[in-house]
Amino acid sequence: MNHTKYIFVTGGVTSSLGKGIISASLAKLLQARGIRVTIQKLDPYINIDPGTLNPYEHGECFVTNDGAETDLDLGHYERFLNIPTSQANNITTGRIYQSVINKERKGDYLGKTVQVIPHITDEIKESVKKLGADGDFDVVITEIGGTVGDIESLPFVEAVRQLKWELQNKCIVIHLTLVPYLAAAGELKTKPTQHSVKTMLELGVQPDVLVCRTEHHLDDEIRSKIARFCNVSENAVIESRDANSIYRVPLLMQDEQLDQVVLEKLGMENNTPDLSKWKQFLHNLDNLKHEVNIGLVGKYVELQDSYKSIVEAIQHAGVSSNTKVNINWIHSEGITEGTANAKLNNLQGILVAPGFGERGIEGKIMAVQYARENNIPFLGICLGMQCAVIEFARNVLNLKDAHTVEIDKTTPFPVINMMEEQKFINNLGGTMRLGEYECKVQKDSNIYKSYGDTIINERHRHRFEFNNQYLTQFEEKGMISTGKNPQTDLVETVEIPNHKWFVGVQFHPEYKSSVEEPHPLFISFVEAALDQ
Ligand code: GLN
């Protein structure tokens, strides 16, 4: 008998109410009681996954160990829970339809007319129950993207309705809404919440808990009004106020007893949560002694969500090194020979971010040059490492036309090429190297000092690779490869030993940093910057 319980988190009134953070916070509060919990995100868009989305559309694409390109909320889940997610944790409408259509082509539906109900909804239900099927989790939290009432999310809400009926007391629905404050009336307004719950009811779903995003305290009168109009118990009307750090939200939710209400409704035992590590992190966050300025050079800086995991990893590392890290957002397109000094001279560390395509690449290369020549601690991630290689080739090896074939296919000096590309065929028919790969680390390197290990495992998301034909030339002139893939010999890390701290990594360390396990490479980078 499977005892897994299911919690659905829906949103109403408006987007950006913080469903992902509320889901992650609730999961944390359950996990702190020893409950085995995972979180899943169902996204109503038609893309198969966010891998092909421009970061301006949807923020960062988060990559899991198994190489799934997923919604950035999965990053929050991992950072809060400190356990890995996988492809099963992120399903889109596109993936659901793809699977149904593939089955239809194979004849699996035995001549039936394939319809949204039951075929699409069954597929959605399968994706939800799959996470609970192995008995690895006591609770599966499923966050439904979008806002109820949207055409796109209808099949998902219908699947929730059916599951709620089938699973009875093993399933609850938490609905997030907005309780706006009208300054002119001097009042909090409950009508949008009432309407949103009505929309849910029209779709056949009665929420069990309401989490109300508000800028002001919800007094007892407002709570009882919401409870009365929306058929929920008063203690299930939860106030969700803005917090100055997302990491404070679990404690705010604990104060509001969200966890207790949920456990009660699911008939689960309510023992005392152990949040000591989490509270220690928050205490440290409030008492940082040092301060440092780090430049984040990228081309999507207008939308900071594009670099979500990097920003969070820097913050985790800052707390671990007792340091408030100020991130200076620097647009790579704005860095030219004339502006580099003015834009970069007040920084104690420079991070050149990942990215795709040509735009902003010369600015990134210039930022690398500035860090290298001025002995400023440098961390290059993915495209950031590739820019470090190009810069070194042009300005130290004197290969003036050095480039990556991603951008210039005719370069006589392709120091980044597609040599190994064909080995990494992903399911889109693309050629991305995705997910976790092993890297063998050279002793005495910065990477080794940081990780304290000769074998590390990190996640990848890129097409292009260091061109090993040039490795000897690089090493002779002082840029060495300190980490390689043991099976393929692909260069995974480069360093300049004759520099204060200069590290480029082909992988994405940011995906593995969490509150309880800040990433060692970011810690070393922040500490090198602090030492500047
Ligand atoms: N565009 C580069 C590649 O595909 C780098 C990708 C990245 O930074 N994630 O290799």
Image: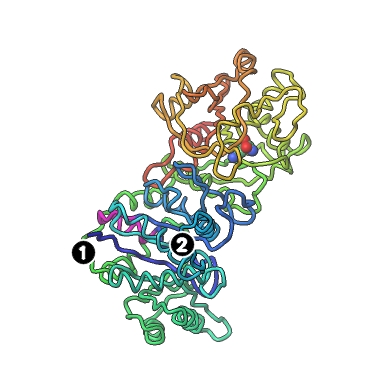
Up-down relation of residue 414 to residue 362 (above or below): above
Which quadrant of the structure image shows residue 516? top left
Left or right of 248, for residue 115? right
Q: Name the residue nearer the viewer: 415 or 435.
A: 435
The colour mode here is rainbow
> Callout 1: 10 Å neighbours few (<14), some, many (20+)?
few
Was residue 148 drawn as part of the magenta stretch in this picture? Answer: no
Up-down relation of residue 155 to residue 196 (above or below): above
Q: Position of residue 251 (x, y in %)?
A: 35, 61
Q: Position of residue 403 (x, y in %)?
A: 72, 28
Q: Position of residue 129 (x, y in %)?
A: 36, 59
Ligand 1 near label 1 (Cβ, under 8 Å)?
no
- Give the residue pinned by disc 2: 110
- Give the residue pinned by disc 1: 269
Ligand 1 near label 2 (Cβ, under 8 Å)?
no
Identify residue type, mark 2: Leu
Which quadrant of the structure image shows residue 121? bottom left
Q: Name the residue nearer the viewer: 432 or 18.
A: 432
Q: Quadrant of the C terminus?
A: top right
Element at badge 2? loop
Q: Name the residue nearer the viewer: 21 or 357.
A: 357
**From which residue to which does the magenta span run?**
25-37
Left or right of 83, for residue 186? right
